[in-house]
Image (cartoon, rainbow, N blue to C red):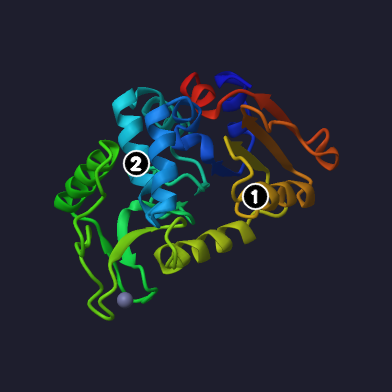
């Protein structure tokens, strides 16, 4: 589906449900980046998997952010003025900072933009400052050179005022992931979704893999299955096929979602 076909589909729809997947983490390029994969393994081994979203973004910036930025610009442009909702399992800060409609984005896997208590104190949740972002980058660069992530006893993001445990980034890779970071926005999404039956619904599932299928992939399929006026456009490098039940109600495009959106 190219830009013209998509415009036509958008014009024929009352509501647009958009899913942004793992491919928006720039994974196709990162997979081929030995520095990225090497340190990822170490972060997991050292109990610092919560740093993975920040590490991805650092590597992605080094490779040049052009493709992802262009894809997001095209998408926000095409969706402008329409009744849409975006669900992202990507943790990309660029998705968080794109000019979507007010309160029409939910990121259930978190980001590298907020910090939480590693011990799980739910009320502790705040923005990461620019200084802290710089500190995280320095730590990642130290780790890249084979040094330790942090000095003994030092907490990169400070400690929890409630229990004294180190603070970590608020994302799904954190040991005690604090879901309060997105739950309110998730309720808004659920309400929006309740308004879709019997409406002409266009579902754009872009680059969604099988890391978190219960967040986007399966519920989107269900939404299309139960809505007679729904159409699913699934774009994915490898997992682009539609299930048999959805035959005739959509299309599967075998292309990386960043590349596809960038060409719209
Ligand atoms: Zn705590």
**Does 94 sit above or below residue 116?**
above
Structural distance between the alpha carbons of marks 2 and 1:
23 Å
Image location (x, y in percent) of residue 254: 66, 23
Q: Which residue is mark 1?
A: 213
Q: Residue at x 44, y 43 (%)?
A: 41
User: Which residue is rendered at x = 59% and y = 47% of the image?
Assistant: 211
Dividing the picture into quarters, in which one does residue 40 lie? top left
Q: Quadrant of residue 8?
A: top right
Q: Residues within 10 Å of mark 1 (few under 14, many from 20)?
A: some
Q: In the rendered image, which quarter is residue 204 located in?
A: top right
Looking at the rendering, the quadrant in which ligand 1 lies is bottom left
Residue at mark 2: C-beta within 8 A of ligand 1: no
* Residue drawn at 18 percent across, 54 percent down: 129
Q: Nearer the viewer, residue 82 or 86?
A: 86
Q: Residue at x 56, y 63 (%)?
A: 191
- Which element is circle 2 on? helix
- In the image, 181: left or right of 255? left
**Quadrant position of the N terminus in the picture:** top right
**Residue 94 makes an appearance in the image:** no
Q: Under tag 1, what secondary structure?
A: loop
Nearest to the observer: residue 144 or residue 123: 144
Give the residue at the far left of this rendering. 131
Under 8 Å from ligand 1: the CB of mark 1?
no
Q: Between 205 and 142, which is closer to the camera in this rendering?
A: 142
Crowding at dot 2, Cα within 10 Å, few <14 / some 14-19 / many 20+, comes out as many
Residue pointed to by mark 2: 55
- Looking at the image, the residue that sits furthest to the bottom is 162
Picture coordinates of residue 111 (x, y %)? 38, 51
- State left or right for residue 68 relative to residue 83: left
Does the image show residue 80? yes
Looking at the image, residue 6 lies above or below residue 131:
above
Q: Position of residue 189 (x, y in %)?
A: 53, 59
């Amino acid at each position: 589906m190219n830009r013209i076909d998509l415009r036509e589909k958008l014009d024929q729809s009352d509501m647009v449900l958009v899913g942004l997947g793992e491919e928006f983490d720039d994974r196709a390029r990162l997979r081929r980046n030995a520095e990225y994969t090497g340190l990822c393994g170490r972060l997991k081994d050292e109990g610092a998997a919560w740093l993975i979203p920040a590490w991805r973004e650092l590597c992605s910036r080094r490779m040049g952010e052009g493709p992802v930025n262009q894809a997001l610009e095209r998408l926000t442009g095409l969706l402008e003025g329409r009744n849409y909702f975006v669900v992202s399992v990507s943790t990309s800060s660029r998705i968080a900072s794109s000019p979507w409609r007010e309160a029409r984005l939910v990121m259930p896997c978190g980001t590298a933009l907020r910090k939480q208590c590693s011990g799980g104190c739910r009320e502790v949740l705040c923005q990461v400052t620019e200084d802290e972002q710089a500190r995280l980058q320095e730590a990642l660069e130290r780790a890249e050179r084979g040094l330790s992530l942090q000095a003994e006893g030092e907490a990169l993001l400070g400690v929890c005022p409630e229990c004294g445990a180190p603070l970590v980034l608020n994302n799904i890779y954190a040991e005690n992931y604090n879901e309060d970071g997105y739950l309110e926005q998730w309720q808004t999404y659920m309400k929006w979704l309740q308004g879709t039956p019997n409406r002409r619904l266009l579902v754009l599932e872009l680059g969604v893999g099988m890391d978190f299928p219960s967040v986007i992939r399966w519920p989107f399929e269900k939404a299309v299955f139960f809505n007679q006026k729904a159409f699913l456009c699934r774009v994915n490098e490898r997992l682009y096929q539609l299930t048999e039940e959805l035959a005739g109600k959509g299309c599967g495009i075998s292309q990386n979602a960043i590349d596809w959106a960038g060409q719209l």
